[in-house]
Image (cartoon, rainbow, N blue to C red):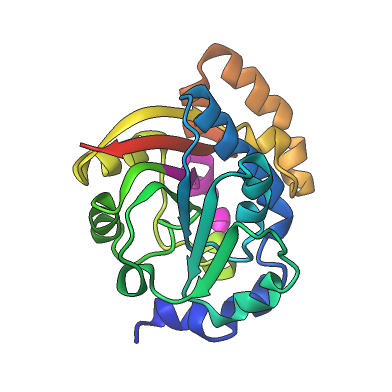
């Protein structure tokens, strides 16, 4: 068993993240619904791989009451969050999606997942034959500011288990390399609208707004603080 997997199969992650970031779930579900609405997609069969507390699927089930939602997570600790999820169209399971499920889905969700897995290329390639569309949420940890300070990168590595770091173009290139066509991508405005923001993040809002007025991509690469949501499909 790898050290990476032990973090989620044992209690290391939940001890450092006791709510499993479920506070962010309504916000993330909204980002998913917005990019699907823009593409005029209403998937009937949806699976979230790495569903964590399951709260994103619970919210999406309210947006799409006629759809069926399935969630997989390898961490046994997440089951404690599932007991109060009463949506009849949400089905959650502890296990390895690739070993325990053979269904083909209209949509697979990978929301803050790829930065945790040992081999993102293999993960995406294995997912490709299992879905018609894919929505991925990437935290864009990599910026000039984060590299110079280094502490932000070490913090997300030690606290939340990020072992890969992305910029917008690195994320999009990864999808291209793994056989996906990117249909849409957009910044989420996380540094301005995400539920959990530190005082430092709030203080950095104005510099980010000012730089972004001139060039949004450059501003994100320089100062960070953003996430990217992507809609893609297998080629």
> Quadrant location of residue 62?
top right
Query: In x, y percent, where is residue 120?
Result: 31, 57
Q: Give the magenta-colored segment's residue range.
A: 135-152
Look at the picture and state if 221 lies above or below 103.
Answer: above
Q: Nearer the viewer, residue 11 or 78?
A: 78
Query: In x, y percent, where is residue 50?
Result: 48, 63
x 29%, y 55%: residue: 127
> Quadrant location of residue 132?
top left
In the rendered image, residue 182 lying in the magenta stretch gets the answer no
Query: In x, y percent, where is residue 70?
Result: 50, 60
Q: Residue furthest right?
A: 199
x 41%, y 35%: residue: 231
Q: Does 123 sit left or right of 87 as displayed?
A: left
Look at the picture and state if 83 lies above or below 204.
Answer: below
Look at the picture and state if 84 lies above or below 88.
Answer: below
x 35%, y 68%: residue: 101
Q: Quadrant of the N terminus?
A: bottom left
Q: Nearer the viewer, residue 73 or 65?
A: 65
x 58%, y 20%: residue: 212
Q: Does 12 sit left or right of 108 as displayed?
A: right
Q: Quadrant of the C terminus?
A: top left
Q: Is residue 226 visible?
A: no
In the rendered image, residue 149 lying in the magenta stretch gets the answer yes
């Amino acid at each position: 068993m790898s050290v990476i997997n032990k973090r989620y199969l044992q209690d290391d992650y939940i001890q450092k993240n006791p709510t499993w970031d479920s506070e962010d779930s309504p916000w993330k579900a909204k980002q998913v619904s917005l990019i699907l609405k823009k593409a005029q997609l209403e998937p009937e069969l949806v699976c979230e791989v790495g569903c964590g507390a399951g709260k994103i699927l619970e919210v999406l089930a309210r947006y799409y009451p006629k759809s069926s939602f399935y969630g997989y997570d390898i961490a046994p600790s997440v089951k404690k969050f599932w007991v109060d999820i009463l949506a009849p169209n949400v089905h959650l399971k502890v296990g390895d999606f690739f070993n325990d499920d053979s269904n083909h889905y209209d949509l697979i969700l990978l929301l803050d997942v790829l930065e945790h897995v040992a081999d993102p290329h293999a993960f995406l390639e294995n997912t490709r034959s299992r879905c018609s569309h894919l929505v991925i949420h990437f935290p864009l940890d990599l910026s000039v500011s984060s590299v110079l300070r280094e502490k932000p990168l070490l913090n997300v590595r030690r606290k939340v288990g990020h072992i890969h770091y992305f910029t917008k173009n690195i994320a999009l290139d990864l999808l291209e390399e793994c056989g996906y066509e990117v249909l849409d991508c957009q910044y989420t405005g996380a540094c301005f609208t995400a539920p959990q923001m530190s005082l430092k993040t709030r203080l950095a809002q104005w510099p980010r707004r000012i730089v972004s007025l001139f060039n949004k991509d450059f501003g994100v690469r320089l100062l960070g603080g953003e996430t990217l949501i992507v809609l893609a499909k297998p080629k």
